[in-house]
Amino acid sequence: MQQLTCNGVLIDDTFAEAFGMRATAIIITAPTLKWARQAAVTMTGFATSVIGCGCEAAIDVELPETRTPDGRPGCRVMIFAMGTDELQKQLKIRLGQCVLTSPGSACFAGLEGSAPLDLGNSLRYFGDGWQISKKFGGRHYWRVPVMDGEFLCEATTGLTKNAVGGGNLLFLAADNAKALLAAERAVAAIERVPGAIMPFPGGVVRSGSKVGGKYKGMMASTNDAFAPTLRGVVDSALTPDINAVLEVVIDGETSDAVAAAMRAGLKAVIDLGPKRGALRISAGNYGGKLGKFHYHLKDLLP
Amino acid sequence: MKALTFSLLAEPEERLDLSGLAPASLAGLTALQIARLRVGTGRDPVLAGDVFKITGKDADSVIIEGSSSRLDRVGSGLGGGSIRVTGNVGHQAGRSMSGGSLHIEGNAGDHAGSGMIGGRIEIRGNAADNAGAPLAGEIIGMQGGILIIRGKAGNYAGDRLRRGTIAILKGCGDYAGYRMIAGTIVVTGGVGAMPGYLMKRGSLLFDRHPEHLVPTFMPCGQPDIAFSGLFDRFLIDENIMTRPLLGQRPGRYGGDNAVSGKGEVLFRRGR
């Protein structure tokens, strides 16, 4: 494989392969940022991959009081799924179990999309007849009485069909600490990109996968080509100086958001340099035949 | 293009029905055709050209220059565009309006915004009784849109309100929100007797504790609710108010328990 060098870091001439997804966004507010974040973190827990969780979700950005509908601190949360029905189902159960239950929370649409998805429209029945509908300013809200006051929730949010899931960067380093530092720098940079989330724990994946496996029924199994302990016994993608690989997976509201996030992540790790961080940066793909969106690393260099 | 302007020549000798002077009915008419529109309500047809000097061409933006309590049904049925009146108007201003904006710089008579469905009415002066309310025999009153009365409103403001927002900024008479079905009424300033009498659902939002509350409204504490912040922001964004109405933790009464009791009075505490 041809390689470029940027600030001493090798950049593989390869691309990340990503897929079209359905996505939505909501704004969760609370009396304090701590509790807004808590509701958002709870709602986006167990939402790392559509393979096992039904959706991929994370906090997009934290919003100050001046940028939320009700003047309280909040978070914009993005949720991605492969289909509209699954997205609606995940949104409803996560909202009902994690946001409705969180102290002082309120929930608003975070996206003007091509179609509506139910928010308060599906949760209002919790009010058992005491729910209050309010329509003003061209928007529809539900107020549901709860034990600490009211759960205020917009009736619907928007759906986008232009979302992209599966943008990624692989950081190959001499040891785990350096790989982790590189990944953390990338995550910190990508967190500042609006409309892009990283659904895995802290934004980082250590168990990158390939499609299928030797066992029947396994949709995905370990990415042996990038597992350092198998370097000598499989057709490895790793050179002898690599002992740890970490991946950052990115879902974006648009293809441009994914590209911007990958560009920000690349820059952060290239700036970190090979001595402290990654020796080499690569990206995961399936040969280009499965995903509609290809992000070539050479096009995204700083 | 200059706004189509109707300048009142003298105090009319009879009540005028100006519902025909709305952008949709005036579009495409020649100056002569406009002057021949019937506006009188008496036996002899009084025409627009008899009582108004008509200038300008842009029918999407109508100005009525003049002031008379005999100018009835201004903006009635308005569906888009704008109408501005420089003085007072008579009854049923903006009746059944569904869109656009109606701006009245003086006072309005009874039934301003009666049965309106959408759009925005702003009355800089006072409005008489039954603002937003249904006419006799009608089942529901206002069903959408925003009705702003910057002065005082008379009795029965928001009678049978179904949806939409009525904001009254210098106090209102008795029975505000009488028989309300849903929707929101904002009142700053004094509120007369029996606000929310027989209201089923909906919200009455006051800047102070109401003095003469219906006995079938029950206190519901001072909940810390996000709705007050959201609605305060809406009022400021719509240029209805310049500072928050309810603030944090407004007081709440639930009622009217003489009917379903699902309505509410929210008020700013401390006043």
Image (tube, helix red, strand yellow):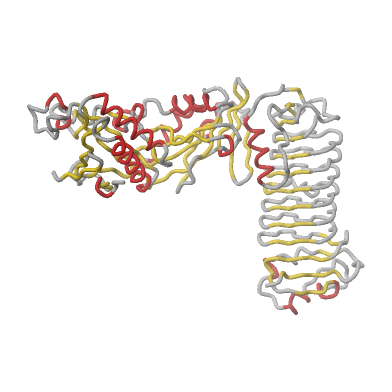
Tell me: A223 left or right of A135: left
Residue at image position (51%, 33%) is A122
Locate the N terminus of chain A and report the quarter of the image it occupies: top left
The tally of labels here is 0
The relative height of residue B14 versus residue B173 in the rendered view (above or below) is below
Where in the figure is residue B109, as x and y percent of width and height?
85, 53
Q: Is residue B10 above or below residue A276?
A: below
The one nearer the camera, B63 or B140, is B63
> Residue A50: which quarter of the image?
top left
Q: Nearer the viewer, residue A233 or A159?
A: A233
- In the image, B263 versus B2, the foreground residue is B2
Q: Residue at x 67, y 72 (%)?
A: B1
**In the displayed structure image, the side of residue A99 where residue A292 appears, left or right:** left
User: Residue B157, how many percent across, how many down?
Assistant: 80, 43
Residue B246 image point, x, y percent:
72, 33
Residue at 36% in and 45% down: A260
The residue closer to the viewer here, A24 or B38, is: A24
